Image: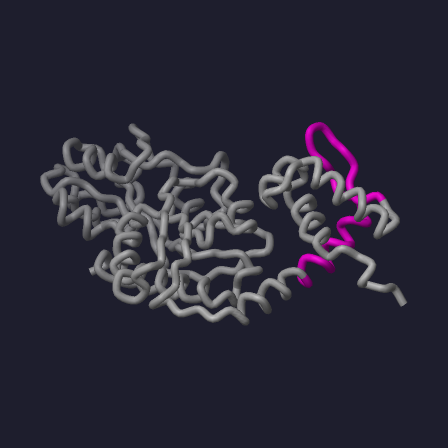
Amino acid sequence: MFNLRSVDLNLLPVFEAAYEEQTLSRAAQRLAMTQSAVSHALSRLRQVFNDELFVRKGRGVVPTPAATSIYRKLHGALGAVRQSVSESRRFDPRTSTRSFFISVSHPLGPLMAVRLLEQLAEAAPDIKVAFTTRSRPIELDRALRDGRVDAAIDWLVPASGPFNGVTLFDDEIVAVARSEHPDLRKTRTIEDLKRGRFVSLRRRVEGESPVPGIQEWSRLQLNIALEVSEILEVFMVASRSDLFGLIPHSMLKIARDTLGLRALPVQVTTKSFPIKMVWSAGREADPAQVFIRKQIGLASRAVVGRGFR
């Protein structure tokens, strides 16, 4: 029987990082090691497994079939170890000083962040949370996987990979106009809608969206006269012109209360799109992660509940 004591188990996370990052430089950065140390560790692993694990390609490395077979078995085992260690740690939100980083790309993100901070001020006063509200953070999948981002809230979520998720709420696209718009009440059908001119948020992905509710809107081929980068710009242009605006339904109350915008009496799409919270499957059972995800859910319901009324 193979003697496991002869293997330096510290080498296994190096293999995992190299496999997932597919460049030694990124693996080194993720592990807080030098690139030469990562290269040396992989050389030792090559001796342990008696097989080539990676081959160089350009500036990166490509895993061999042997490495892929090893990773499939190893990744789950390392995740189980991480969960076991996390579960054994005592977590008390009232005294914890943990820090979290949350990505919230939905336009309600800043309000969710404020609500979350208000909740934590009461339940966990020493916990620190930072946020990004960029429409699509760079390398989000990798940041979730390696722990730089603890949770992400969006309708564009990783299509595959070691992630878990839950739907926070369902949203949909609604057309709005200023209350004095001459065609506000006359626009009642899709054909009426197609005769209008619109201001809309710039699309976040090239080609067809993977989200059915967004696909349906795109296929209408509405007359988009102006594309902007921020939802507030849609509000401002629609409230000061005869362009119709396209906004998430969850923002309708804010649009109405702040700038007097009104929803057109026509349904833009028949399909909603889920707003999801996703996180690394390897951190599923971490008590601190469970706590912060619960708080995010509460903040989302509080903000969206007010928005839909």
Residue 145 location, x and y as percent? 56, 51
In the displayed orientation, state which residue is furthest to the left: 180
Q: Is any part of residue 271 visible from this angle?
A: no
Q: Camera-side residue: 159 or 19?
A: 19
At 41% across and 66% down in the image, what residue appears? 291
Return the residue found at the far right: 1
Residue depicted at 30% across the width and 36% down the height: 230
Q: Which colour scheme is used?
A: one colour
Which residue is found at the position 81% from the left and 63% from the top?
4
Q: In this view, does 78 lie above or below 130?
A: below
Which image quarter holds the N terminus?
bottom right
Residue placed most toward the observer, 304 or 266:
304
Location of the C terminus (image quadrant): bottom left
Q: Position of residue 35 (x, y in %)?
A: 67, 36
Using residue 266 as the reference point, say whether residue 215 is left or right of it. right
Image position, residue 267 (x, y; %): 29, 51
- Numbered range of the magenta stretch: 52-77
Residue 297 showing in the rendered view? yes
Q: In which quarter of the image is residue 288?
A: bottom left
- Quarter of the image for residue 125 reads bottom left
For the point 46% across and 47% down, the residue is 156
Q: In this view, does 31 lie above or below 125?
A: above
Q: Where does the image place residue 118, in percent across and percent down from the top left?
A: 25, 59
**Left or right, residue 158 beside residue 60:** left
Image position of 40 (left or right of 210): right
Q: Nearer the viewer, residue 147 or 32?
A: 32
Residue 72 on the magenta segment: yes
Total numbered labels placed on residues in the image: 0
